[in-house]
Image (cartoon, helix red, strand yellow):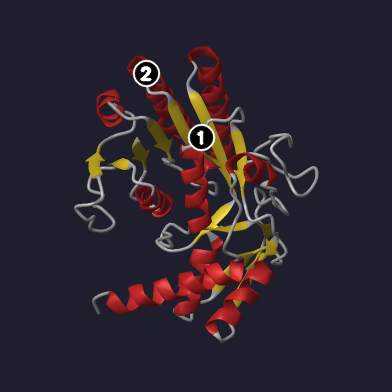
Amino acid sequence: MKVVVFGGGGFIGSAIVDRLLKDGHSIRVFERPRVAPYRAFSAMEHVEWLTGDLLSTHDVSEAIDGVDVVVHLVSTTLPKSSNDDPIYDVQSNLVATLQMLNLMVQKKIPKIVFISSGGTVYGSPEYLPIDEKHSTNPHVSYGITKLAIEKYLLMYQRMHGLKAVILRVANPFGERQRVETAQGAVGVFLHKALRNEVIDIWGDGTVTRDYIYIGDVAEAFARAVGYDGTHSVFNVSSGQGTSLNELLGVLERTLGHPVERRYLPGRSFDVPASILTSDLARRELGWSPAVNLEEGVGVTVEWLRQQAANSPR
């Protein structure tokens, strides 16, 4: 199949592109201007690299022309800062996605796979682990916008027959994670620990999250691209809860030395615990996580050390 991956040059997108290439798909990557390919592609890999603006109907129309599946990974905001400017969040993400959906209907593109947020769309848990039937009460604009996009995807599916697959991904970590934007506790903590810098913990360290290795996330997207069943919304998670204090313990065991930490007042938007169940994805997609937290952290540490060794001094 021919697949366009919006945001295919980023942390999650690059892993998904690499995984889809293994299945023999032809890939068109759509990225922001001045974002260079994350690696060199061989002549045997069918990759087309486009840059443009997600809000430009011209750019998006060109990107989706002739494809079989759209994979939509783009978000212009982060959970921790999205409340600062919710209007921008809506304009740059929700409006842009609606324009994309209208173009898909016009061009008769049959399918879209969208990355939603398992960490924010549910809000405070009413029970654990959280399944797809759990109520959705996001605390942050990021989660509200993700949820609104989900609802429009399902509306377009009902109105126009557009197949929508929505993956509510927990807290991904692994190679190529961007630590400079403070995105993802595992990446940020490792970045600081490898430099012997102090790690800031918001609260007492008992905040619990569900961390999922990026290779497992990419596998879920590969399964979703080929999925033709009746379900539309899936959690993608490890199903295991890990507190920040426990995560620091995993890092210390992996690195072989203690890490310095500093506890700060808790943040109002951090829910105490978020643990998801992926039973539906196991049944429908035939997917299950293959890499546990300690294994994934070990792989990530080796990648970070290799990057540091190869970087100019």
Name the quadrant containing residue 117: top right
Q: CA distance from mark 2 to mark 1?
A: 32 Å
Q: Which amino acid does the dot numbered 2 rest on?
A: Lys
Q: Is residue 19 above or below residue 176?
A: above
Mark found first going from the N terminus, 2 or 1: 1
* Name of the residue lying farthest toward the right: 127
Quadrant including the C terminus: bottom left
User: Taking the image as drawn, is residue 258 in sight?
Assistant: yes
Q: Residues within 10 Å of mark 2 (few under 14, many from 20)?
A: some
Residue at the extreme left: 43
Which quadrant of the figure has residue 107?
A: top left
Q: Quadrant of the N terminus?
A: top left
Residue, x 33% and y 50% (percent of image)? 9
Q: Which residue is mark 1?
A: 86
User: Which disc is residue 108 wearing?
Assistant: 2
Q: Report the residue at 22% width, 58% height from top.
A: 40
